Amino acid sequence: MLPDPIDDRGQRRSWSPASLEARLPLTPRVVLDRLITAVLMAIAFIAVTSPFKGSLIRSYVFGGASSWLLWVLSIGIFAVLTLINSRRPRRHIAATRRRLQLEHGRCINCDYALTSIPPDRDGCTVCPECGAAWRLPDYSPLIADELASRDGDGGRPSDRIDEPVTRARR
């Protein structure tokens, strides 16, 4: 599960059903990030568990501990490394999703089109559907092929994702 988004006014918002359906494209950066994560996990696992697997070292370190105990220890170390590393990809996905939706002028929480709504004095645009406040970029170029692939009509017929962004530069 992705972490709940925090809007630009510091309010924690829970994901709405509309935004849970959104999928990020599998970009080369995401693939590279996953590959680097897998390689680093394998290196860390080998580095931590290799001293315990040799028969000579096993007899000195553990005083003749049985083989099954060493395998349990190895699996436990791997589980701890996996838990430590499991938060990183989710944070990356949430940050990428936030950036893409704001570039398209969409509410991160409910996927509502915010391009026609003027910002408040603090620069945040408040979503009329869910009440979340977001700072949209000054100019949001439309990257239709990235987010249009997630569903055919962009969520709702009234605020399609492939409509041109009408927000003017400040």
Image (cartoon, grey):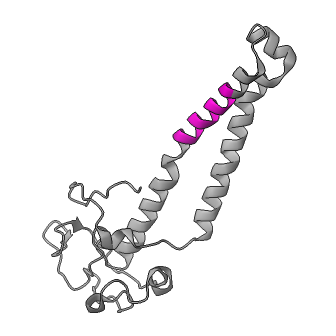
Percent from the top left, x then y, of residue 124? Answer: 20, 68
Q: Main secondary structure of the magenta part?
A: helix
| Snapshot quadrant of residue 49 | top right
- Based on the picture, tell me whether residue 76 belongs to the magenta stretch: yes
Q: Which image quarter holds the N terminus?
A: bottom left
Q: With respect to residue 148, does 129 lie above or below?
A: above
Question: Residue at horizontal 67%, vertical 50%?
Answer: 38
Q: Residue at x 27, y 82 (%)?
A: 113
Q: Is residue 147 above or below residue 76?
A: below
Residue 111, image x and y in percent? 30, 75
Q: Quadrant of residue 98?
A: bottom left
Tag count? 0
- For residue 74, which quarter of the picture? top right
Q: Residue at x 72, y 40 (%)?
A: 43
Q: Is residue 83 above or below residue 54?
A: below
First to last magenta residue range: 72-84
